[in-house]
Amino acid sequence: MRFLVLLGAPGAGKGTQAMILAQRLGLPHVATGELFRAAVRAGTALGREAQQYMERGELVPDAITVDMLLERIDRPDAGEGVILDGFPRSRTQAEALEAALLERGMAVDRALLVDVPAEDLVGRLSGRWVCRLAGHPYHVISNPPRIPGICDVDGSALEQREDDRPEVVRARLARQLAPMQSVVEYYRARGVLRTVDGRQPIDDVTRDLIAAVETVRPGA
Ligand code: ADP
Ligand code: ADP
């Protein structure tokens, strides 16, 4: 059982790393942003509710987000653990996760902060393209696809996210950095936080994350 949380500002590289770690460690990748986007595409009540917040760059309210996340981690494929990407994003969410895991006899083993300075984030987000099928992330400069406009992994078309437009990026950074910092402090206080330099090339960030995870002993 390994319960890992990836933390970082919007654009820090959480999704990129979570997908690689999920494959390497054989754990499901659970991204609340992807769950919300799937709900928006499906046109569900949850999707309609979440969309209002996402398009303004605000956090979706905690109650909605926590319910959705707990439903996801109770599915059988999460039995051996999970890599959480984009959750928790507030202290309230962190507390709700801790309480829910405690009920299930579990705890967060590692909270991994992918640390990127604020001045790099706008460039990361404005150059991001993601695939339509699964949200695999690319970057026009730092991480281009092999064939322009096409996902290397599944061949689907690349598109820009609605909330990566400059005005929404500004709102996301203005609203989301402080709550993220409160989550970082939450895990630091519990002794499970490890920080990795997210300005390095993608492979080097992965190497440092794996090293931080390998020091987790089962049951420790
Ligand atoms: P990024 O990877 O760029 O940080 P995400 O895909 O994780 O963005 O999230 C997109 C949007 O979905 C967020 O800006 C926010 O509106 C919403 N969202 C995702 N996760 C959460 C969460 N844990 N709590 C509240 N809102 C969330
Ligand atoms: P997050 O999920 O934290 O919002 P992403 O994984 O989507 O971040 O990455 C944001 C953008 O930065 C993407 O365009 C991605 O290709 C690019 N990126 C990710 N990691 C790195 C890195 N180590 N160096 C440079 N660019 C990166």
Image (spheres, rainbow, N blue to C red):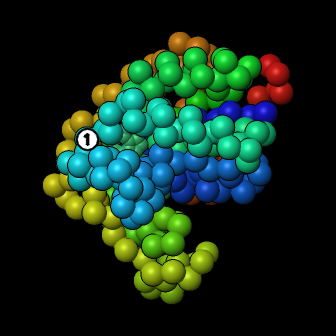
What is the quadrant of residue 209 in the picture?
A: top right
Looking at the image, which residue sits at the far bottom? 147
Q: What residue do we see at 68% from left, 50% from top?
A: 28
**What x and y, as percent, mark residue 122?**
28, 54
User: Which residue is label 1 attached to?
Assistant: 58
Q: What residue do we see at 23% from left, 53% from top?
A: 55
**What x and y, as percent, mark residue 56?**
20, 48
- Circle 1: element type: loop
**What x and y, as percent, mark residue 17?**
58, 52
Looking at the image, which residue sits at the far front? 45
Viewer-proximal residue among 210 and 85? 85
What is the quadrant of residue 181 in the picture?
A: top left
Residue 96 visible in the shown view: yes
Q: What residue do we see at 42% from left, 51% from top?
A: 36
Viewer-proximal residue among 69 and 179? 69
Residue type at mark 1? Glu
Dividing the image into four quarters, tell me where ligand 1 lies. top left
Residue 200 visible in the shown view: no
- Residue 32 is left or right of residue 27, and the answer is left
Looking at the image, which residue sits at the far right? 218
Q: Is mark 1 within 8 Å of ligand 1?
A: yes
Quarter of the image for the C terminus: give it: top right
**What x and y, as percent, mark residue 42?**
42, 63
Asked if 215 appears above or below 42 in the picture, the reply is above
